[in-house]
Image (tube, grey):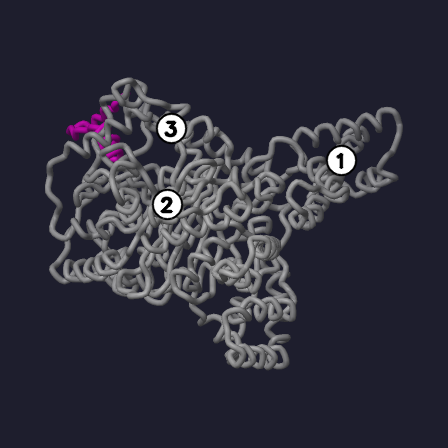
Amino acid sequence: MAEAHQAVGFQFTVHPDGVDIKLSQEVIKNIYQSGLTAWKKKVILFKNGVLAGVYPASPSSWLIVVIAMLTSLYIRLDPSLGMIDAIKDNLPYRDCMSAQTQAVLSAILFATGLWLSLIYLLRYTLKALLSYHGWIFESHGKMSTTTKMWLSLVKMFSGRRPLLYSFQASLPRLSVPRVDDTIYRYLESVRPLLGSEEYNQMERLASDFKDSIAAQLQRYLVLKSWWATNYVSDWWEEYIYLRCRSPIMVNSNFYIMLRALGVVPMCSTQMERMFNTTRIPGIETDIVQHLTDRKHLVVYHKGRFFQVWLYTGGRHLLPSELETQFQRILSDTSEPQPGELKLAALTAGNRVPWARARIKYFSQGVNKMSLDAIESASFFLTLDDEPQGYDPAKTNSLDGYAKSLLHGKCCDRWFDKSFTLISYPNGKMGLNVEHSWADAPIVGHMWEYVLATDCFHLGYTEEGHCKGDPNKGLPHPTRLQWQFPQECQNVIEASYILAKQIADDVDFHGYLFMEFGKGLIKKCRTSPDAFIQLALQLAQFRDQGVFCLTYESSMTRMFRDGRTETVRSCTSEAVAFVRAMEDASATKAQKLTLFRKAADKHQNMYRLAMTGSGIDRHLFCLYIVSKYLGVDSPFLKKVLSEPWRLSTSQTPQQQLNIVDINKFTKYVGAGGGFGPVADDGYGVSYIIVGENLITFHISSKFSSPDTDSCRFGQHIQKAMLDIQALFHPENDKIVENGEHVYLVNGKKHL
């Protein structure tokens, strides 16, 4: 342990004549380097804070303005129109200064005020420019003169070399949509899902809501949008994530395997809590605890918890030194302490028992110290003892890989940490991510950077070891100590049993769709996302025989503190297209026309969601206001209780563009996934990888007799092939030996 290692450096003995102190030169040097590093970090943080605070200007521009003012005084010009003289006349202690000093100080003060005013002018000009979203609604490949001018102005006012948080103050606030618009779009979205009588009833509920309390709720929401940086995000985090008392494993957490944005800046707020962050359980609601800086991580291996320090001598451990530390853990043959093996299952079960156990059994002694080490760690690392990963030679290898990342053994991931990094003995890796603090694109951004850095910058020796010579004198990883009474062990076992039931019920299927990818879809002159979403609607109808409310996640990070919005993919246009695809009498031309209408509708819905005109976050916030006011709304209650039987999400790829995935195909990631949202529904995550590959991650529950993830995957594959055949006459479906065979780019596919 690092603290112990430094403590023994100070040795002292007591003599009758006094205390004889012996100091370890090595430890003194270590302490000096650590302190130096800490101050360097403070300086860097201060510097970055200043650079981001004055952006899009720079500190050097202040000096330019000051020199210009002083020069004007020297040549007897007054660009301040008398303001410098006014400042000079009101300077405190002016009698103690010479006339020249007064003039110079007044000019500097005026220059500083002018400089700050220009910064705010630039910032608000940039905010006004970023509030324009007309560009996103233009057809792909076409750009209007207005958008060209806008883009030039954005580039001009964006400054040079921005940092991660440079644009935060310039991002526009998310505005509240009009109630009439939201209700109209909501009714439009449910029209294809309801019968005439049900739809008329919903119309009446909406009308009653609009005529009664809608205006009152909207006023409070608009007031919040003026005061808060984002009228949705804090309530979304609290009520959707932190107040949920059911297990977060499978139900909330998501995973990312070994493995968008470029026109305008995106909000970076979520990135602040990537490290040193833990979800702390509570009786009524959880909290997200974020610490500014931590120097250790906690490693789990075969039921044991180890604390590993990430710094030595004031610097990060080298990759070769981390390898040494992990090898020491792998070589440790000690047994788990009583209750330690399944301890992490507390984070996988219901939240209330975990919160009560935390108060009762982890509030003092060694249990508190060890739990503090976990909850304050930079992140959590699991060294799995069973190999995982995609292997084309093994059936269902991707399924097992996904389930391992999603829930593992239910007791070998700390599901409350911002993320658990999972490393397998065959070199494969992945992440299990707690969802309340951030959304998938944030973690995907970090993961893409980590993988590219590891593969292309750090590298390994021919023997497979990390490059560099490790410091052999590093203190060994320290076992965390636990003392669990039988009562506590019973609580741990109860959480494990519940988590195991949830995990065993997850029916997961993942597969690589390699028949075609983004390259062929682009030739159809349509959005790849719209293409896949319509294929999902066709697959859903073929699988279930009915249409259902469909959730697709979109980002709202063009706004300050923005997170997500819902795209309701099952539109009337999509339903018309699917019915035509299932109608033997419909011609290919009719199907193609309906496809284009449905795809255009989907793209417009997605754009509305991204630009703050979505449906569901507005209705959700209106509902929260109604609960605060204690007023009842049958309409909002009905809306918020509707099940999402098909929940979908696209995993972003190449957010950094630091790896050419067409050139380095073996470094392509398989994306990530999540559990089903509804007990009788599907969860589908997909990643469009390069030009010729799409990966699907499909989840459902074994306990549902109506769903089957593998079957749904087959429906998706056939739907994708059926749709592409509409665009390419040469890719028609033929019958060969009684089987339907598709010809895609001259190749046969079942």
| Residue 10 is one of the magenta-drawn residues | yes
- Vertical comparison of 244 with 51: above or below: below
Drawn side of residue 720 relative to residue 371, left or right:
right
Task: Give residue 111's mark.
Answer: 1
Q: Nearer the viewer, mark 1 or mark 3?
A: 3
Q: Residue at x 76, y 27 (%)?
A: 67
**Sequence-first tag of 2 and 1:** 1
Task: Give residue 466's mark.
Answer: none
| Residue 36 is one of the magenta-drawn residues | no
Residue type of the residue flagged with mark 1: Ala
**Sequence-first tag of 1 and 3:** 1
Magenta part of the chain: 1-25
Residue type of the residue flagged with mark 3: Asp
Q: Residue at x 55, y 66 (%)?
A: 189
**Alpha carbon separation for disc pair 1 and 3:** 47 Å
Q: Residue at x 47, y 58 (%)?
A: 537
Q: Which residue is mark 2?
A: 736
**Sequence-first tag of 2 and 3:** 3
Drawn side of residue 164 relative to residue 93, left or right:
left
- Vertical comparison of 221 with 389: above or below: below
Q: Nearer the viewer, mark 2 or mark 3?
A: 2
Q: Which residue is mark 3?
A: 454
Residue type of the residue flagged with mark 2: Glu
- Kindly indicate whether the residue at mark 1 contacts the one at mark 2 (C-beta within 8 angstroms): no
How many C-alpha atoms fall within 10 Å of the one at disc 3: few (<14), some, or many (≥20)? some
Task: Point out residue 561 in the picture as x, y percentages from the top left corner.
Answer: 55, 52
Give the image quarter of residue 117: top right
Q: Secondary structure at mark 1?
A: helix
